Image (cartoon, rainbow, N blue to C red):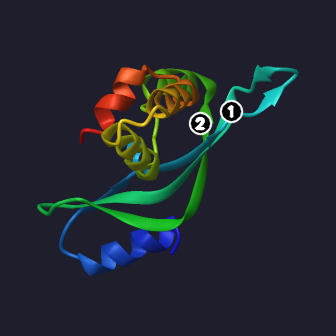
Amino acid sequence: MNYYEAQDAFKKMYPDRLVTFEFDEKCIRRIECVYTDGEMHMGNHIEYRHVKVIPEGMPSLYVPIDPHREIITAATVKAKIPKDAVYVHPDELKMLKELKDSDSPYYTSKLYELASYAGIDSEQIAASILK
């Protein structure tokens, strides 16, 4: 179901309630920056794969939707990227934990490899395996 079909469905499901829809950080699937001659365009693309549905007086929920694309400004991209966390797949963290628990000599090199790919401190990744 696409974004507009989701809106129609939830408005019919809750005809006596105000239902609002928003795209927040959790809804983002992809941001595409468009460049010409090495410089970012002022208008870029954002793609959402979920929409946050907020029925009045009820808990909100995230509903999967078909890809929904919009234009996003370069200023918004530049403001967003520095504050973004980097997703490290749970399988990577599991493998890292297994290496650490077995006192493997490969633990340190794998930890630093993940940190260099993610652009974050190795301590942040090490702390993630404890969760």
- Is 104 in front, or is 77? 104
Q: Which residue reaches farthest left?
A: 57
Relative placement, left or right, of 107 versus 76 is left
Report x, y in % for residue 6: 43, 71
Report x, y in % for residue 5: 48, 74
The answer, for residue 24, to whether it is visible in the render is no
Report x, y in % for residue 51: 41, 58
State which tag comes first along the sequence, 1 or 2. Answer: 1
Report x, y in % for residue 83: 42, 24
Q: Residues within 10 Å of mark 1 (few under 14, many from 20)?
A: some
The answer, for residue 93, to whether it is visible in the render is yes
Q: Residue at x 52, y 53 (%)?
A: 48
Provide the secondary structure element on which disc 1 rests.
strand
Residue topped by disc 1: 43
**Residue type (three-letter) at the residue carrying disc 1:** Gly
Location of the C terminus by quadrant is top left
45 shown above or below 120? below
Q: Residues within 10 Å of mark 2 (few under 14, many from 20)?
A: some
37 shown above or below 104? above
Provide the secondary structure element on which disc 2 rests.
strand
- Is 65 in front, or is 129? 129
125 shown above or below 6? above
- Is 121 in front, or is 99? 99
- Is 26 in front, or is 4? 26
Q: Residue at x 56, y 21 (%)?
A: 78
Residue topped by disc 2: 72
**Residue type (three-letter) at the residue carrying disc 2:** Ile
99 shown above or below 112? below
Residue 15 location, quadrant: bottom left
Residue 117 location, quadrant: top right
Residues at marks 1 and 2 touching, judged by CB atoms closer than 8 Å: yes
